[in-house]
Amino acid sequence: MAELSPKDRLKIPRQHIPEQDPEIRKHNFNEVNLGYTPEMAMLEAQRCIMCKKPLCIAGCPVAVKIPDFIKMIAEGKFREAAAILKEDNALPAVCGRVCPQEEQCEKVCVVGKKGQPVAIGHLERFAADWERQNIGIQIPPMKEKSGKKVAIVGGGPAGLSCAGDLIQMGHDVTVFEALHDIGGVLIYGIPEFRLPKSIVKAEVEGLENSGVKFVKNYIIGLTETIDELLERFDAVFIGVGAGLPYFLGIPGEHLNGVYSANEFLTRVNLMKAYNFPEYDTPMFDVKDKNVVVFGGGNTAMDAVRTALRLGAKRGIIAYRRTEAEMPARIEEIQHAKEEGVEFMLLVAPIELIGDEEGWLKAVKLQKMQLGEPDSSGRRRPVPIDGAIEILPVEVAVVAIGNGSNPIIRQTTPDLKVNKWGNIIVDMDTMKTSKRGVFAGGDIVTGGATVILAMGAGRKAAKAIDQYLRDPDSWDRPKTEQVEVAQESK
């Protein structure tokens, strides 16, 4: 391949990733994005101008060597590209699908200053998929065994990332998961059409082949406490996520047909309710029903798009701000629109209305207008006096965020938490108030992204490795512990 000048590279248009047709995909659970062909991937990779100071690496929470793996793709060296990716990312095929690259690595891409940024996420997905489909997931190099044992509590993104690094560092790693499958939110929260479960399972198997042990159906805090783990492990990492759903606190939430997004998506994704009765997971039938989802994040988009695939007559997003303030990815909002999702903006639910038999029949919506910015930097929604609307619906899904499950903090009293129940850590090392115990991901920050949780897992792994090799390092002067403030919902 002839070497292109930066000027010639900038002339190459960004390669649009092929997608299922909206009219077809809204009736199935197959993946929406279909992935690059090798030719498309190599052409897109040539758009990278190989900056001397690549800002994209700093924009990645796990510090993937982005120019290096992209250069390999441009040269057709796909095996090498995948190997470079996995030096820093235990779940590249997952991250290539669900990470908000547009707000991280692609946001600071120099090419994006004069046009569209390099499609880093699509290229990451391509390299990881190529490896899995052509040569199988390869085991990265391992250091000599240290003889130390680490318990990872929670098999989600933070725990898997931490486990992936620690096993390479030579430590024995056991992951304890409360559910019957490994992956956390990747398994129960993100729908098949965005993240096929076979992808998650394959990357988990890659970790297992590297030596990570997995124990399922094991609830730390009930089956065994943190203190009991410390009797047989040298260190513990807590990455249990934020799995306790927030509710609206309005009349009528007890009605039949009202779900938290957690329950709704878990029944469909992890428990495969969409394939009833082959999978014995009953769920209130949404077919031919009017479904409203409260919220404006990716989880809300996942829920409403899932409802349409289950045969809902209408799928409606009700959000109290405007589209500009929605935290969901632009791609997810666009896909939802293409599939027929309706958006009701500047409205807030104030009552869920049922019939005499306790079934949801309508929602009372308060119309809003935007006032001054709040602590999140977004303009605060303010009610418009007397502006009320009644929306007939039979199913409502609440997708306004999650808090921390109290089981671990209730059984580990010397583990310091903040007023939201999130574990307090030193953000430089992810150390908690309890010796030998580290934590990261949503249990520390509140609900955030997959890649930020993975970044916390990697940071913790580095600190755990230091602690295992030098236990006295725990007591040396360190940065003051930081209480991470979760934005009030």
Image: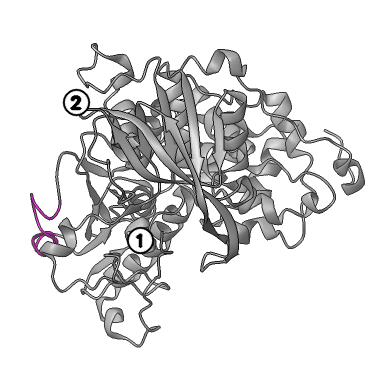
Which amino acid is tagged 1? Gly
- In the image: residue 110, left or right of residue 28: right
Whether residue 18 can be seen here: yes
Residue 129 shown left or right of residue 103 in the figure: left
Q: Quadrant of the C terminus?
A: bottom left
Residue on which disc 2 sits: 357
Q: Which mark is residue 294?
A: none
Q: Earlier in the sequence, mark 2 or mark 1?
A: 2
Give the extent of the magenta segment: 220-232
Residue for point 45% across, 32% down: 391
* Amino acid type indicated by mark 2: Glu
Pick the residue in front: 179 or 422: 422
**Which image quarter: residue 189?**
top left
Mark 1 = which residue?
440
The one of 53 and 11 positioned closer to us in this rendering: 11
Judge whether residue 76 is colored magenta: no
Picture coordinates of residue 139 (x, y %)?
41, 39
Dot 1: element: loop
CA–CA distance in space, label 2 to label 1: 44 Å
Does residue 208 appear anywhere in the picture?
Answer: no
Quick check: marks 2 and 1 in contact, CB under 8 Å? no
Question: Helix, strand, or loop for circle 2?
Answer: loop
| Colouring | one colour
Magenta segment, prevailing SS (helix, strand or loop): loop
Residue 64 drawn above or below residue 58: above
Tell me where residue 168 appears, x and y as whole percent. 38, 52
Q: Does residue 225 belong to the magenta stretch? A: yes
Name the residue rendered at 38%, 57% in the picture: 457
Instruction: Give percent across and percent down for residue 442.
Output: 36, 56
